[in-house]
Amino acid sequence: MSGQATRIAVLVSGGGTNLQALIDAQSRGELGNGRITLVIASKPGVYALERAANHGIEARVLARKDYDSIAAYSKALADAMEEAGIDLVVLAGFLTIIDEQVYERFPNRILNVHPALIPSFCGKGYYGLRVHEAALEKGVRVSGATVHIVTPECDAGPIVLQKAVEVRQDDTPEILQKRIMEEAEWRILPEAVRLFCDGKISVEGHKVLIKGEKS
């Protein structure tokens, strides 16, 4: 580990449960060389901002409604993160569309967690409870979560980590959502962040290689 911490920005749009999982992992020393130094919310008043404040993390609101286009918003977001010296961007329930300006300025340095086993139940329109509704409608026996590197194509970037979760016959979308968060999302998102911050991740083509990690 180098002496210089990897500076992490977490982007949020709501309650911030995945942000809390990252904060908890950091407090246990489980983010390796990483440190959450900035939280940005796409709308004011969300509980994620309170979570950041409770742990002394700088938080700011960049409200999408204050910008007249996706391009203008994306530029402001990328500028704010560059000015803060951010090394890694984590999307944690960030539901605002951004364009290639962000991806180009943080290439292979943006992580997202998706509540399904990509390539199942992913892409445009698959977010929140819709993912779990689709999984239950299909009758799958196993679902889970995926952490992937973000690219301009929705949910199509290189996969970093996945974890499977059992689907039970009496599951509702809400029950399945909660189980996947607790058993998968809140475990693999901090782990993927740790791997990045400790320099263990490299991207070759469309695949992520993890150095020194047993499969």
Image (spheres, rainbow, N blue to C red):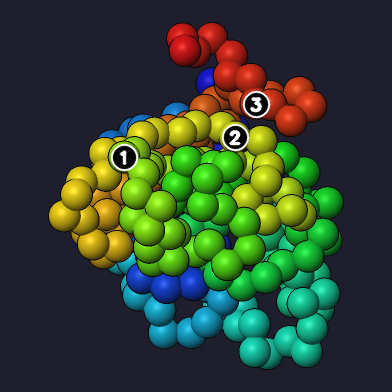
Question: Disc 2, disc 3: CB below 8 Å?
Answer: yes
Q: Amino acid at mark 2?
A: Ile
**Residue 110 at what x, y percent from top left?**
65, 47
User: Which residue: 54% across, 9% down?
Assistant: 212
Residue 169 visible: yes
Say which mark, if any, is on residue 159: 2
Q: Secondary structure at mark 2?
A: strand
Q: Is residue 134 above or below residue 70?
A: above
Q: Of discs 1 and 3, which sits in the foreground?
A: 1
- How much space separates mark 2 and mark 3, taking CA atoms? 6 Å
Amino acid type, label 3 = Val
The residue labelled by disc 1 is 141
Horizontal side, residue 10 vs residue 177: left or right: right
Q: Are marks 1 and 2 in contact (CB under 8 Å)?
A: no
Residue in the foreground of this view, choosing between 60 and 209:
209
Where residue 82 is drawn, which disc sits there?
Answer: none
Q: Residue at x 34, y 49 (%)?
A: 139
> What's the distance in space between the residues labelled 1 and 3, CA to CA?
27 Å
Quadrant of the snapshot with the N terminus: top right
Q: Residue at x 64, y 20 (%)?
A: 209
- Work out whether mark 2 precedes mark 3 in sequence or the reverse, and give the earlier one: 2
Query: Which residue is tagged 3?
Result: 208
Asked whether the residues under the numbered discs 1 and 3 touch, taking CB atoms below 8 Å apart as contact, a structural biologist would say: no
Asked whether, in this view, residue 153 is left or right of residue 173, the answer is right
Question: Does the rendering let one see residue 40?
Answer: no
Secondary element at image label 3:
strand
- Residue 47 is left or right of residue 171, and the answer is right
Q: Earlier in the sequence, mark 1 or mark 2?
A: 1
